[in-house]
Amino acid sequence: MNKAILLLSLIALVGCNALITEQDSTGIIIENDEMIVFISPRGAELQSIQSKRNHGEYLWHGDPDIWGDRAPVMFPVNVHFKDDQYTYKGKRYEMPFLGLAYRRSFKVISSETKNVAVFELNSNEQTLQHYPFPFLFRVRYQLDGYKLINEFTVENTGTETLYYALGGHPGFTFITSEDAQRSDYQLTFSKSITMDRPIISGGLWQGQHVSFLKDDTCLNFDDPRIPQSGMFLKDSPARQIGVGLKNEEPFVTVDLGTFPNVNLWSLPGRPFVCIEPMVSHHDSYDSPMAIEEKKHMETLSPGKTEVYRFVIQINPDAET
């Protein structure tokens, strides 16, 4: 089956609610015997994750009336800087919401096999206006059975220290039938967690913590502890976080891989959740303007490269 036919099949399987646009039709399809995945070069953003066995869609469909994105890649900032600004060597710069990778066109540099796609963003005149650091940023997706490996490469191609943060932001759909309710679903943790969480407002840490998880291995989506803002777990002790019906196996699980932190975001009353692996974390309300003084930022020496991975795994046998 050629890729044009595959794309038409994908659109038919997802249906009109998936909001696939004409621009999306320039995207890349990867597949194996178990899964088919659609990726847009715009932001190197996942658009669809489906099982071939049950034709189920696992990725949030990007309803603009609720949350119009699906799986944005955040680089070189997680969410945004305070006032969307920072300074470097005393000069002020504006950093776009979710960073430079968000909605920016990536170059498709490789379709190694039908189950792999690689996207690349190089610094250029436009990026240097917002971020005065030469860099190469690569996003690689690979299917392996029911696993989708998300790999990110950050390379400092300049002559000075590179300051950056990195995060995935995939959203996953639940409440897939008319008689289901939000309270029927839960997050599951591979290890019991007892920890407070920072208060986040407007995408910024507020300098305070509140009691959160207490020896919990799951968190129901109608739990009153779930806020409007994110639930950030620094150095998350649970390395696998799943979404599923209560008392059932998760139908999708994110393995944090080499990402130390995770942000969980699910708007109360809405049928989706984002599981956001993060290197570094949100900026804070009292963060210094100078990027050199933002202690949460990662640093990379000239000529050096860092590679990060997390994995999305679907379970077509689990009830949704």
Image (cartoon, rainbow, N blue to C red):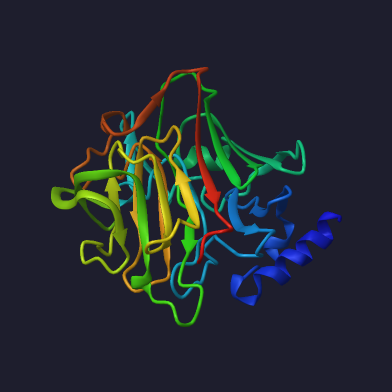
User: 227 above or below 203?
Assistant: below
Residue ID at (65%, 50%): 41
**Nearer to me, 224 or 299:** 224
Q: Do we see residue 65 in this rendering?
A: yes
Residue placed farthest to the bottom in the image? 179
Quarter holding the N terminus is bottom right
Q: Tell me where residue 12 sits by quadrant.
A: bottom right
- Image location of residue 258, percent across then percent down: 44, 32
| Residue 144 image point, x, y percent | 64, 41
The answer to whether 61 appears left or right of 192 in the picture is right
Residue lying at the far front in this picture: please name it. Answer: 247
Q: Nearest the camera: 75 or 307?
A: 307
As drawn, 46 above or below 107: below
Image location (x, y in percent) of residue 293: 26, 30
Residue farthest to the right? Answer: 1
**Quick check: 54 above or below 77?**
below
Asked if residue 302 lies left or right of residue 119, the reply is left
Whether residue 305 sits left or right of residue 2 in the image: it is left
Residue 97 appearing in the image: no
Tell me the residue at 50%/18% (across/down): 304
Percent across and percent down for residue 170 are: 48, 53
Residue located 45% across and 56% down the image: 249
